[in-house]
Amino acid sequence: MSAFVSAIIVAAGNSTRMGIGKSKQFIELKGEPVIKHTLWAFEISNVIDSIVVVCREQDEKDIKDVIRSGGFCKVKAVVYGGKTRDISVKNGVLACDERTSHFAIHDGARPLVSDKDIKAVVNEAIKYKAAALGTLVTDTIKVVDENDNIISTPDRSALRAVQTPQVFEKNLYLKALEKGSNKGITDDCQLVESIGEKVKIVLGSERNIKLTTKNDIIIAESFLNK
């Protein structure tokens, strides 16, 4: 049986660090809201079969307006998020099509993910059961103590900055979700790692940034202008 991949777009954060008084999903990039760029990447991908959007209750109408105006045929449900990321993802999982074989979990605030990277990470997850995009770490990383004194310098050749999508075989992820709930884990890879499973890292792109601060908006715009 061929894979049926459901994308879960997590757009339920409070956008506190952006400091704009509204959800960053509606910030405009090249005249279109962030969430529209994100949804489009998954709408056009031929490895994605269905999309579920997880949002804040107060953003539901605006999210649905974007879906309607954008003609996003793959979006099958819009559900509310929870107090923590794992609850939000779980709500998205529960709304997925029953035919789903794999979940592709992605941050709504990563609007520049490419079709090439989506395909690459989905294909690796189908092969290995769990995969995530990640980039090489170019800065020297230091581990510090509680007083900010350096205590060690890890080898950066063994480090990766993890992005999304993070893609998991359905039963594997459900098992991890059940055992990892209420442990404060905010990264889906870590959730799967916590039950002793391996996650394959697929080299991603520096374009696939997460919009967290106003400076990230400037960087995203510069990528789009290219």
Image (cartoon, rainbow, N blue to C red):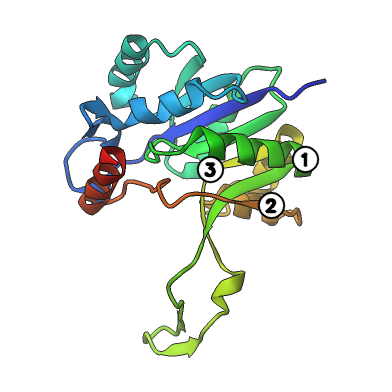
Q: Could you say which disc has been placed on residue 86 in the image?
A: 3
Q: Quadrant of the N terminus?
A: top right
Can you see residue 56? no
Find out whether the residues at labels 2 and 1 contact each other: C-beta distance under 8 Å. Answer: yes
Comparing labels 3 and 2, the label whose residue is closer to the camera? 2
Q: Residue at (70%, 45%) from the top-left corner?
A: 130
Q: Secondary structure at mark 2?
A: strand
Q: Count residues near mark 2 (Cα–Cα under 10 Å), then give few for <14, some for 14-19, many for 20+.
A: some
Q: Amino acid at mark 1?
A: Lys
* Location of mark 1 (residue): 127
Query: Would you place residue 150 above or below residue 155 in this image?
Result: below
Comparing labels 1 and 3, the label whose residue is closer to the camera? 1
Q: Secondary structure at mark 1?
A: helix
Give coordinates of residue 17: x percent, y percent: 25, 52
Looking at this view, name the residue that lies furthest to the right: 1
Q: Amino acid at mark 3?
A: Asp
Q: Quadrant of the C terminus?
A: top left
Rounded to the nearest whole Å, what is the CA distance between mark 1 and mark 3? 25 Å
Of residues 59 and 108, the one drawn nearer to the viewer in this rendering: 108
Q: Residue at (53%, 30%) from the top-left corner?
A: 8
Q: Amino acid at mark 2?
A: Lys
Q: Count residues near mark 3 (Cα–Cα under 10 Å), then give few for <14, some for 14-19, many for 20+.
A: many
Give coordinates of residue 158: x percent, y percent: 61, 71
Give coordinates of residue 136: x percent, y percent: 52, 63
Looking at this view, name the residue that lies furthest to the front: 226
* Location of mark 2 (residue): 200
Q: Could you tell whether 195 is left or right of 17 in the image? A: right
Can you see residue 35? yes
Q: Could you tell whether 120 is left or right of 68 in the image? A: right
Q: Secondary structure at mark 3?
A: helix
| Residue 221: quarter of image | top left
Query: Would you place residue 221 above or below residue 160 in this image?
Result: above
